[in-house]
Amino acid sequence: MLQSRGKLIVLAASTSESTEYQRSTWRQMLLATLPDKYARIMGTDWSTAVEVNPDGTAKYVPNGLRVIEALLARRFGEENVAVCYPDQLPLFVGEDTRVIGVHAHNPLGITFATDVYAGFYGRDCEPINAAEFRRLIHHPVIDQHRHHLKLIVGGPGAWQIAHKGLQAEWKIDTIVDGEAEEVAVDLFERAIRGEPLPARIECKSPKLESIPAGINRSTFGVVEITRGCGRGCQFCSVALRAGKSIPLEHILENVRRAVAQGADTITLCTEDLFLYEQGKRFTTNLPALKRLFESVAAVPGVKHIMMTHGTMAPVVVQPEIVEELHLAVDKSVNQHPASTHPEHRYAMMFVGLETGSVRLFKQFMKGKSYPFRPEQWPDVVLKGMEIMNRANWFPMCTFIIGLPGETREDTKQSLDLLFALKDAKWCVIPTLFVPLEDTKLATKDGAKIARLTDLQWEFFFTCWRYNIDFFRRQRSVHWKFNIGIPIYYYLLGRKLFGPAMKWPLFRLAHFPEWILRRKLYLDFSNGAKPVYTTPAEVPIPEERRRPELPVLS
């Protein structure tokens, strides 16, 4: 029964980080980057829609918060821990509350994509995810009881608050940076006793036995299958930590709990699907992956399986991977007419391509192509896309604009690779480089949308032209969109970003290519030949061949 004086421990997450809109992780993340002040006008206020249990607790929240909930419930008792959304905080925060833990995935909206799109509407626009987090952290009930409780913030984006110097202003006692399984219980015990807390805690990757099974379901039915990666990309902190796999029975226990609480979709959360139970030197363990998918699919109540991240190189090394993992397509929630599946289903997974420049690739992310050489990266991308598409895997790929030291020649190489992918079945998200903490590029300057060159603008809007042409179903509304773009440019875009964006933006509006070909680098008119073409094969260098795998002839 709900305690009238509040719960001892209250955990909370913002609605934009918790919503299960259209069962789509990428829509949730991307649409929360739109400007909050225009959310209702643009019809995007659904980006904060969530479900509440009869007792006022959250039906689903990000998985990281569920992990902390499980740890604290084990130590202090489930009856003393409540997990909720901002609107329900007054039900659980009271005189007996001693600590509030807040999950922060992207609290200020400054990660790779999220500080971009709100900026198109003016420099004073705040993205939805930042506005929703601010609404949570400044909730009146927290201020009302601030004198007798501690406020702890953790999660993958918690570093943003310290980075912007907001910790003192927001009266946050402790910011937890990293994976908190081995520090959370002690930290909350000290908070309950009213002891002074450290301003910031840096966490190391925990031992597998420190990761508990969840008690309640996560957003999108997220179930972790791996932690870490180890490929060494310099712009990513996870890539610097060695990969490790969660035991299958632990995974299935979380799946069963999620289904028991109403989830019919399970999302396999990983930094790289193909590293699950990996062999030596990033070798994909296909039997283990098949066993994982089959075991999850066999749990009564599981209707759909989704995936998070993966890399391209393993698919080129072992093309049979995507064919053998047919459950990724059969159990997908996604459908598209371009799929050859009987129900037009397709598997979607986040794949970081990041650049078409071999020079930048070799400098910042060469481990991503292993066992292939960095110089083979364009071939790996094109061949991998061909293999995936043939098996009805339509990946969501990211490219990073403005990596440190990027030159016009680097951008042209990325454009050349983008052009070669013009007929692919995919979604491509252009992002701007952000120097994330705990990475090797943390001290570098980030890319700014107001400083993009004409070539970078061309890359940005060509990506979105691809997405619109592939995913938009209602062709009848194209003309409204196309007319609106030049109106936007002359009323606002030109003022905010200058003339460099003009012709790239007009490509997004489907201006005739006989006009654009004289203004832009890429020529989409009939007969234009790509610099890159999909190779018949991508040979693995002799010194990198793995004896346990068949040699590609």
Image: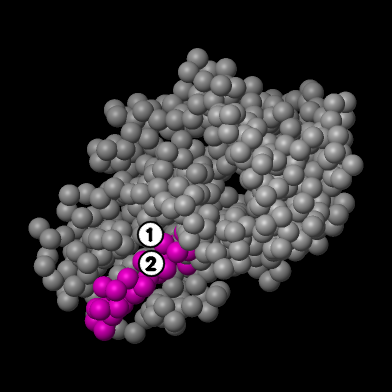
**Distance of mark 2 from mark 1, alpha carbons?**
8 Å
Q: What is the three-letter code of the residue carrying label 2?
A: Arg
What residue is shown at x 35% (from left), y 52% (from top)?
61
Please state which of residues 470 and 429 is positioned toward the viewer in this rendering.
470
Image quarter where the C terminus lies is top right
Q: Residue 116: x percent and y percent?
A: 62, 58
Q: Is there any visible trace of residue 286 in the rendered image? A: no
Q: Is mark 2 on a helix, strand or loop?
A: helix
Q: Coloring scheme of the render? A: one colour
Q: Name the residue under label 1.
A: 14
The residue that appears at 66% across and 52% down in the rendered structure is 488
> What residue is rendered at 37% in x and 42% in y?
221
Residue 94 locus on image (x, y percent) = 18, 72
User: Sequence order check: which comes first, mark 2 or mark 1?
Assistant: 1
Could you tell me if the residues under marks 2 and 1 are in contact, i.e. CB atoms within 8 Å? Answer: yes
Q: In this view, does 141 lie above or below 431?
A: below
The answer to whether residue 121 is seen in the rendering is yes
Q: Name the residue under label 2.
A: 135
What segment carries the magenta color? 129-158
Q: In this view, does 514 lie above or below 404?
A: above
Q: Which residue lies furthest to the right in this view?
A: 518
Magenta stretch holds residue 32: no
Image check: 435 left or right of 289? right
- The location of residue 219, given as percent across then percent down, is 37, 47
Q: Is mark 1 on a helix, strand or loop?
A: loop
Tag shown at residue 383? none
Density class for disc 1 (Cα within 10 Å; few <14, some 14-19, many ≥20) is many
- Label 2 neighbour load within 10 Å: few <14, some 14-19, many 20+: some
User: Which residue of the protein is positioned furthest toward the top in this rendering?
Assistant: 342
